[in-house]
């Protein structure tokens, strides 16, 4: 499957721009980190294979900004 990207700007559910078929693999990554304020976001459960249901355990976590 061709690569695609999505901008995620905060907490909450998101939908990939192209649907995956049952048995398709996925491998997500964080392409760039927020810069205003500077943060180091993390990705959990960013790869796997679909198994007849929506993938619901991928998480992007934004740390609280450092006090300025």
Image (tube, rainbow, N blue to C red):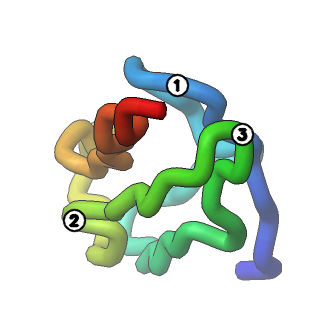
Instruction: In this rendered view, identify the residue nearer to me: 38 or 17.
Output: 38
Label 2, on which residue?
45
Q: Using the rendered view, name the quadrant where residue 54 is placed.
A: top left
Whole-percent x and y of residue 14? 52, 29
What is the C-alpha distance between the residues marked 1 and 2? 17 Å
Mark nearest the camera among 1 and 3 is 3
Q: Tell me where residue 1 sits by quadrant.
A: bottom right
Position of residue 15 relative to residue 42, above or below, is above
x and y percentages locating residue 10 in the rendered image: 52, 25
Tally the marks: 3
Pick the front one: 18 or 68: 68
The residue shown at (70%, 67%) is 32
Label 1 sits on residue: 10
Occupied quadrant, residue 46: bottom left
Residue at position x 65%, y 50% in the image: 34
- Nearer the observer: mark 2 or 3; the answer is 3
Separation (CA) of disc 2 from disc 3: 26 Å
Secondary element type, mark 2? loop
Could you tell me residue 57's position as x and y percent?
18, 45
From the viewer's perspective, is residue 21 above or below residue 10?
below
The residue positioned 28% from the left and 75% from the top of the image is: 48
Indicate the secondary structure of the residue bearing disc 1: loop
The answer to whether residue 4 is left or right of residue 57 is: right
- Residue 4 position in % (x across, y down): 80, 65
- Cβ–Cβ under 8 Å for marks 1 and 3: no
**Which is more N-terminal, label 2 or label 1?**
1
12 relative to 51 in the view: left or right: right
Q: Which mark is residue 36?
A: 3
């Amino acid at each position: 499957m061709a690569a695609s990207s999505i901008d995620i700007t905060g907490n909450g559910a998101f939908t990939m721009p192209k649907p995956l078929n049952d048995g398709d693999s996925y491998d997500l990554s964080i392409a760039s980190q927020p810069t205003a304020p500077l943060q180091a976001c993390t990705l959990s459960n960013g790869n796997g294979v679909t198994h007849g249901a929506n993938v619901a355990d991928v998480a992007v976590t934004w740390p609280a900004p450092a006090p300025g």
